[in-house]
Structure formats: C-alpha cells, structure tokens
Image (spheres, grey):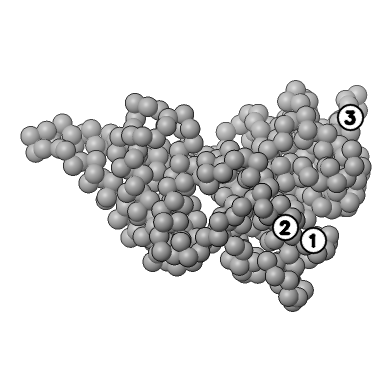
Amino acid sequence: MACEQWRGNLDRYLDGELAPAEAAALSAHLRSCPQCSNEVLERVQIKRAVHTAGSRYTASAALRNRITQDITSESSGGSTRRWSWILIPAMAALLAAFFLSAYIDRERVAQQRVYSELADLHVATLASSTPVDVVSSDRHTVKPWFQGKIPFTFNLPELAGTEFVLIGGRVFYLEQTPGAHLIFQLRKHDISVFILPTRAEEIRNLPSGTGNASSFNTETWTQNGLRYFVVGDTNVDDLRALSKLLRNAG
Amino acid sequence: MRVSEKHLNAASFEAVAMPLFDQLYNFAHWLTQDRSEAEDLVQETYAKALRGFSSFQTGTSFRAWMYRILRNTFLSSRTGLKTMVVLDDAATEEPLTDTVTPEALLIEKASREMMQQAIEELSLPFREIILLCDVEEMSYQEISVALAIPIGTVMSRLSRARKALRIALQAKITGGRHGV
C-alpha cells in the first residue's frame, strides 16, 4: 500500500479508532517508513499539545454550588414535612451514592488519561528517529545507564532463551515524575515498558491487570513501590509473558 | 458513562451529571469565549438535561447526550447564532492548501499560549470537533452523537480541522500570514 493510503488512516490510528488488525498493519508500516513515522510523531505532538492547551478554563465553585442547589431543589420538590423523617436518611444515602459515583468517575477519567498518555508516548517514541537514548540489548548496560537520571532503581530480566529482545531505554515523564521507558521487541513488534514510582495519586490508584488503550494492549502492576506499565500491539498473552519475566526479575 | 433505566431520577442525575461539570464548563467557555456567557450556558444545560432526563435513552452515552444539549443550547443563543458557520461537508471536500512543514521540531517550539490562540482562531465547527476529540477524548461515535453528524463527517471534519490547526500553528511559529 502506498504511503498516501496509510496516511489517510493516521488520524484514526492515533485516535484509537482503527480495528486491531488495521492498527497492527499500520504499526508495521511505520517501523519501515521514516516519512510516515515523522508524520505520526508530529501529529502525536499536536494532539498532546491540544490536550494540554485545551484544558484551559476553570469554573467557579459558586457556579457548581448554584447548579447543585438547582438539582437538589428539583429532587426534593415533591417532599412533605410528614415524610421528611423517612426522606432524610434516604437523601443521605443518595448523597453518599453520589459522592461515591462522582469519586469513581473522577478516578476513571484520571486513569483513562494516564493510559492515553502512555499510548501516545509509545507511538511518539517509536515514530522518533532516535527512540532510545541508550541502545543496547545488554541489561547490564541499560540498567546502569539510568543511575543518576531517575530517583529509583529496578531489575531487568534475563531474556536468553526467550523470544524477547531488549532494544534500549530512555527517561520519560508522567505526572511530573521521571521514570524509565524500556523498549523490547518480540517478532518485530515493539513493546514499551514504563516504570515509575507510585507517588502520583492517579498512578497509585490504578487497578492492576490487563486492558486496552488506543488500540494497544496494556498490562500494569505495582511491585516494590514501583508501577509497571507494559504497552504494545502484540497479543495479551505475549504482554503477560513479558510482564511475568519483569515481575520475576523485580 | 451508562445510566440504567431504574435510576432515572433527580438524585441519580446529580450523581452522573456533576462529574462532567468541569469539562462541560471548559467546553462552554471555549464556545462562548466569555466567562459569564459560559456560566449561563452550563446552568441552562443542566436545567434542560434534568428536565429531559427521563427521556434519556439508557444504554447510550450520557456524556455525549449532555454535550449535545450544551451545544444545541449554545447554537440557539444569540452568540451561537452569530458564531456558527454551517458547514456543508460535501461542498467543502476540497482540502486546505497544505503548506505544513513536516518538521516536528516546529511544534515543539509552540508554546501553550500559542496553541491556545491557534485553537481560538479556528472556526467554531473545527474548534469544537478538535476539543471533543483531543481534550475530551471522545470516541468518534460519541462525537457523532454530540454534534449530530454522521461518523464519516466526524472523520472528514476532524481531518480538515487538524490541517487548519497545523497551518495556523505554523503561521504563528514562523510569524507568517497563513489564514485559516
């Protein structure tokens, strides 16, 4: 397929709207086409910049209170004094349910944002002409390179006898926290492993397990005070296999 | 966000609608470009949504439904009527002149303020679709509901909006005079 045809799908690819098979085919093309990779890199940068710049306006607390009062007065409009002794505990229960629901929703939005940023970082890094700052398949070279660059240390697994290959690493930032970004390869599929301290609340509260972000499969867990994210377009079993190796090393 | 049928009452409306408050306000302010108008718009949106909550179709996206109400309310306001340019997507298939330099470095030079100005200067149909996709991170399906346009139009309009944004941004970075 010519580059022009691939480019017609780039927006849908970055917006997570391509079917997994199409996304995998496009990922494979990006690995072999510097022009399209550069195009992806630029689009990812703009998308991230729009996300940051677009979150611009903050509502006043007074407006929030006003609207909440409007809703509350509407919901209690039909009540009578005779029933208030029954309604007070019921309203208290509803209020508790509201706060719980609001809390869960906020958490969900924050979690989606973290995954979305990691998926963007994964794509942007692979599209870059210099995806890693330390290029080595030797874990004894890659791990020491991070010393002094990030405020923690981690262990890398022995990959001999497995299909995984370590490509290298770089420093990345998420929620103003520096972390280690490692790139592994499996049968020409690139897999990103992000490791960072569980300091930020959004990261600490993320549930462990497998998931999906912008067409990529993901696996995450916490170990020794560090949060691990594995992101790639390989199947879930392969991500789990790499996660298991990392867990055993940690 | 999904709402089950048995929970369509005012208290559950508050529980599902208020978590959207901050993002709805941000979107309203981008549309109106005025704090006071944005506040009125959000308040009216909540009042309309509460009144129509029983007609909300359960199993569909509540968030897209709220944005649709907000946008319709805006479009019927005086500012909205003045601002909105109705886009005939079939008639504007001609792509914008592509003068974008394929240098990612240019984008790195753009400051947050520069990007905000570039978004601000986009026509309303372009501005709103970019905000819904890249700031609110809505799926194409949700955007289609919120803007009441087919998914094919979401894709073509988004593509043209992004191209317009890149041109506007590049003009700002290089100090050129490219129009949007």
Give the image location of residue A41, x and y in percent. Answer: 79, 52
Neighbourhood count class around disc 2 (C-alpha, 10 Å): few under 14, some 14–19, many 20 upward: many
As drawn, A47 above or below A208: below
- Left or right? Give the position of A24 relative to A113: right
Residue at point 23% right, 32% down?
A90
The one nearer the camera, A201 or A216, is A216
The quadrant holding residue A54 is bottom right
Image mark 2: chain = B
- Left or right? Give the position of A32 relative to A106: right
Image mark for residue B98? 1
Residue at point 91% right, 24% down?
A161
Residue placed farthest to the left in the image? A82
Amino acid type, residue under disc 1 in the picture: Asp
Disc 1 to disc 2: CB gap under 8 Å: yes
Give the image location of residue B65, x and y in percent. Answer: 45, 41
Amino acid type, residue under disc 3 in the picture: Arg
Helix, strand or loop for disc 2: helix
Residue at point 70% right, 70% down?
B179
